[in-house]
Image: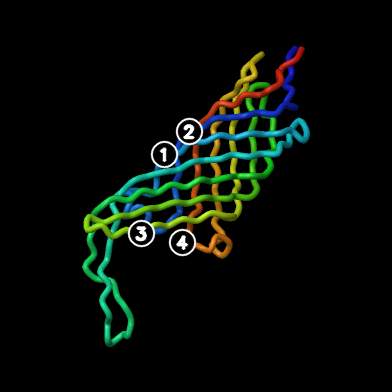
Amino acid sequence: SQTTNSNSAFVSLNGGGTFTAHEDFGKVYSSQFGISYGAGLGFPLSSKLYIYGKATYFAKSGVPIFYTLTYDTTLRTFVKSNERKEGSASYSQWFFNIGLQYNFSLSEEYRFAVTGGFTLTRINEEQQSLSGSSSILKGSGLLGYFGGVGLEKNFIDSPFSVFAEAQYNYSRRDILNLLGNYGGTNINLGIRYYFKDRRKQ
């Protein structure tokens, strides 16, 4: 009979989508959802526990909203007026997840996984109006934490498997030092390659 031997490092490729938690993101980019893709790797600590890492790239284009600021003498502050939507906007973000993955064997072919650890991020956003005025936002650093679940299907006598995975990236705003919530949920499908044969007689 055949049994599963999981003591092997792996690499993976994945694609899917990201639901960003950034407030008002949909006003500029039509929705909170965008296509994302990435790659991952794992190093076994035991037959069930892995050191886990994944990089996910999320990007979207849209039309920015610009405001004219006027000074309110009564309130003694600047207020937004003359809202207009014009020009171009581009947003990109990397999620770097570093942590642990623990596998639960459901059968010879299927495994359920739980992942968790730290999330680092890199953000770039550029907005430009038709008149030529522009704004640029860049930031990188420790975003916060991530947690997720996944389901993996192994193939008999093959180093390949396919998987579905969902991860939530929790934004610690006091860590990143940027205004707004830059976390979000990544949902993807992928293929995984194990460097050692996981099947043995």
Mark earlier in primary sequence (4, 3): 3
> Pointer 1: what residue?
35
Q: Find the distance from the CA under tag 2 to the CA under tag 3.
A: 30 Å
Q: Find the distance from the CA under tag 1 to the CA under tag 3.
A: 24 Å
> Pointer 3: what residue?
135
Q: Residue at x 22, y 55 (%)?
A: 130
Q: Residue furthest bottom?
A: 74
Is 113 above or below relative to 110? below
Amino acid type, residue under disc 4 in the picture: Gly
**CB under 8 Å between callouts 1 and 2?**
yes
Q: Residues within 10 Å of mark 1 (few under 14, many from 20)?
A: some
Position of residue 32 measured from the top left corner of the image (x, y, whole percent): 39, 49
Which label sits on residue 72? none
Q: Find the distance from the CA under tag 4 to the CA under tag 3.
A: 16 Å
Is 8 above or below relative to 30? above
Is 83 above or below relative to 127? below
Mark earlier in primary sequence (1, 3): 1
> Pointer 4: what residue?
180
Q: Residue at x 59, y 36 (%)?
A: 150
Amino acid type, residue under disc 3 in the picture: Ser
Q: Find the distance from the CA under tag 4 to the CA under tag 2.
A: 26 Å
Element type at mark 2: strand
Q: Nearer the viewer, mark 4 or mark 3?
A: 3
Q: Nearer the viewer, mark 2 or mark 3?
A: 3
> Pointer 2: what residue?
15
Q: Is residue 61 left or right of residue 131?
A: right
User: From the image, which quarter does the C terminus lie in?
Assistant: top right
Mark earlier in primary sequence (4, 2): 2
